[in-house]
Image (spheres, helix red, strand yellow):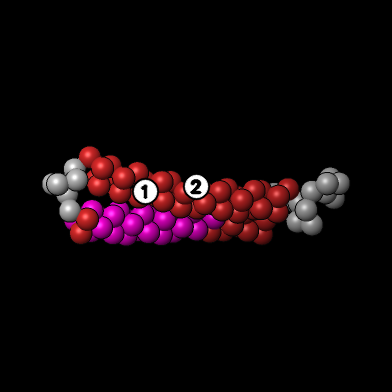
Amino acid sequence: MFRQGWGRRGPHSLLFYMAFLLVLAFLVGHWVFARAVEVYTQSILIISFPGVVSTDLAQRILQMLRWAGYLSVGAGILVMGAGLALYWGALTYLQRSRRIF
């Protein structure tokens, strides 16, 4: 029924694992980018404005950037989860209505 080399459920199990790896790569990339922005901002604030921007103000700005990064990662997780749920629901509907397989 299925070609050899696909997963147990056909090609869609392979697509599911590929989507999972895409989500994982997105989250890791987002985390690395957020840390890089944090380090870059801290170095710019403290080096460029040593007398103007205090260390306390720099720490507050960094805290805001950190929370913005957390919210952005959370929103990314929600959007990716919703996309996977829609994909899985559509696949289930098509399989049950015998339109595929």
Which residue is painted at 32% across and 59% down in the image?
67
Residue 82 visible here: no
Which residue is painted at 78% across and 53% down in the image?
7
| Front residue of 82 and 62 | 62
- Name the residue that disc number 1 marks: 39
- Name the residue that disc number 2 marks: 29
Which residue is painted at 37% across and 59% down in the image?
70
The kind of secondary structure element at disc 2 is helix
Q: List x then y, in percent, for residue 52.
A: 13, 46
Question: Hey, which residue is sitting farthest top in the picture?
Answer: 48
Residue count near mark 1 (Cα–Cα under 10 Å), binned few <14, some 14–19, many ≥20: few
Which residue is painted at 52% across and 51% down in the image?
28
Q: Name the amino acid type tagged 2.
A: Gly
Q: Name the amino acid type tagged 1.
A: Val
Rendering quarter of residue 92:
bottom right
Query: Along the polypeptide, which appears first: circle 1 or circle 2?
Result: 2
| Front residue of 76 and 25 | 25
